[in-house]
Image (tube, helix red, strand yellow):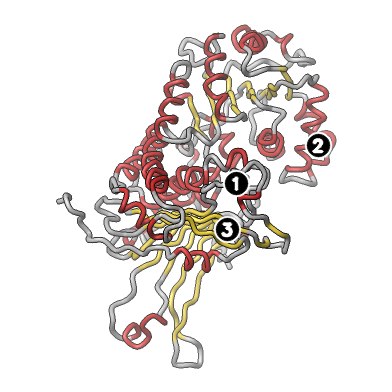
Amino acid sequence: MNIATDMPYCRLDATRFSPQPALFIVFGASGDLANRKIFPALYDLYLEKQLPDELLMVGAARRNYSTKEFREILRASCLAHSRHQDEALHTDAWHAFSQRVFYIQNDVADPQSYEPIRRLVGEQDRSVLEGLAPHIAIPHNILYYLAVTPEFFPVISENLGRMGCGSNASAPGWRRLVVEKPYGKDQRSAASLTEALHKWFEERDIYRIDHYLGKEAVQNLLHFRFANTIFEPVWNRNYIDRIEITVAEQEGIGTRGGYYDGFGAARDMLQNHLTQLLCLTVMEPPATLSPEHIRDEKVKILRAIPDYSPQEILARARRGQYAVGTNARGEPVPDYLNEAKVRPDSTTETFASLTLSVENWRFSGVPITLRTGKALAEKYSEIVLYFKRPPSALFAAQCGDLLAPNSLTVRIQPDEGIWLSFNAKVPGEPAIRANSLRFSYREVADYFPEAYERLILDALSGDSTLFIRADESELAWQVIDKLEAAWASADPKAAPESGGLLKYQAGISLRDLIAQVREPVLREPVLREGLV
């Protein structure tokens, strides 16, 4: 359990940005993401008194809603998905929040349908917002949130730009663009998308969102590492034996077959979520806490990943695809090939693992395994650092492999917290076994925001720390592109270590699946050939 203290704590408000009043325009406002995540997050922020008083929220979508109808639809969504179930039932709170929510009918592919947005953004035409109260001012700052499928990112940015609604240094306020994943399907498409967005929006105004980075446990990585001298000195190759970063999911692909079968686990998860966790886990301390200094250090990690040959990357990677089984609730799960909108001969992986090394001074030679899978027995996300065993003397000499290595686990979800595993004597016996110290975020915090809440506040504040820069995205794609090319040339029926696709039973434990694919544990010389 956590130990409460009366020690003072250091606030970082001096280096923290503040959310500013803005027009928050959500494209795709009738879709699932907007209704399950974005607007409920805005409502939760409102209930927590975190939003600027002058914020106006505008939904834009093809459906022919009035503002009143849109508010009623959002009310049901916000009540269903809000963290504040009790407060969300308060009529007064919802009424006050909804008076700042409006709707504009918009076909993202039709340039003419952007005319109301042009009038609203460029001229502050109040008639665009149905029922806008006379005392409510229209902010000059504009935040566009693209809650649409990726093929519409360049379409929307171009239509906004041609209407004069893109980045504009001479405008009285800022104009920012938030885009969701997937950001491209490979390095080339990501670079092409960036080029298209840069025609109308400056890089400083583009916020590529990765909701994993909004989780409190992820944000704590830098604080935990660099604010504690008992951990930072041993956070290197001299003491760490290996690192494992895992995202295990219990559900299959559900209704996402049309999207997922064209991507797979490596593109869907390794390229973004897990690579970002890798960067935050092993990066060097930034010069300051400014967003660009932090993102500079993340880019250095990506540049330090070796340029593996196809043979090397196949030896380091494993892939699998779930077959018939049962989920954690005992419900039947079909074979992946029988899921809706999946090709009958698909070799798309639903499990992927990749063991990398980061060839810098701090971590050279330390295996770092990224893994993710669907239709597994467990659901969790965590980072585990395994420390080297003590010298083969005293306890290690007698216990051998029975002496557990020390480990540090950062649990991202569920049960967010930190676990430190260590060895101690068994009371009353001449024996030793592993024990752990646990820190739980939920036991020390009354306010525990969801990821989208934090990221929305950061976008309104202009804090890009937890958003992905263009060069980060393209460097991460370089690694996955090599992996995908190697798998494409490998025989799916080959052994897992030769690039084969293992069929695994839905509902299998991750431990058993790792054993089946024979995941590698690689050891390399501290200095690779060619490095001096």
Residue 511, above or below 152: below
Which amino acid is tagged 3? Tyr
Q: Earlier in the sequence, mark 3 or mark 2?
A: 2
For label 2, count other residues whose C-alpha is less than 10 Å away and answer few (under 14), some (14-19) or many (20+): few
The residue tagged with tag 3: helix, strand or loop? Answer: strand
| Residue 283 at x, y percent in the picture | 35, 48
Which amino acid is tagged 2? Ala
The residue tagged with tag 1: helix, strand or loop? Answer: loop
Looking at the rendered image, the disc whose residue lies closer to the viewer, 1 or 3, is 1
Residue at 60%, 62% in the rendered image: 505
Q: Which of marks 1 and 3 is nearer the N terminus?
A: 1
Left or right placement of residue 56 versus residue 270 in this view = right
Left or right placement of residue 302 versus residue 437 in this view = left
The residue tagged with tag 2: helix, strand or loop? Answer: helix
| Residue 21 at x, y percent in the picture | 61, 24
Q: In which quarter of the image is residue 151?
A: top right
The numbered dot on residue 502 is none
**In the depicted view, which residue is nearer to us: 317 or 126?**
317
Residue highlighted by disc 2: 76
Residue at 59%, 34% in the rendered image: 456
Q: Do the residues labelled 1 and 2 touch (CB within 8 Å)?
A: no
Residue at 52%, 13% in the rendered image: 161
| Residue 273 at x, y percent in the picture | 49, 46
For label 1, count other residues whose C-alpha is less than 10 Å away and answer few (under 14), some (14-19) or many (20+): few
Residue highlighted by disc 3: 380
The numbered dot on residue 344 is 1
Q: Earlier in the sequence, mark 1 or mark 2?
A: 2
Which amino acid is tagged 1? Pro
Q: Quadrant of residue 423?
A: bottom left
Q: Do the residues labelled 1 and 3 touch (CB within 8 Å)?
A: no
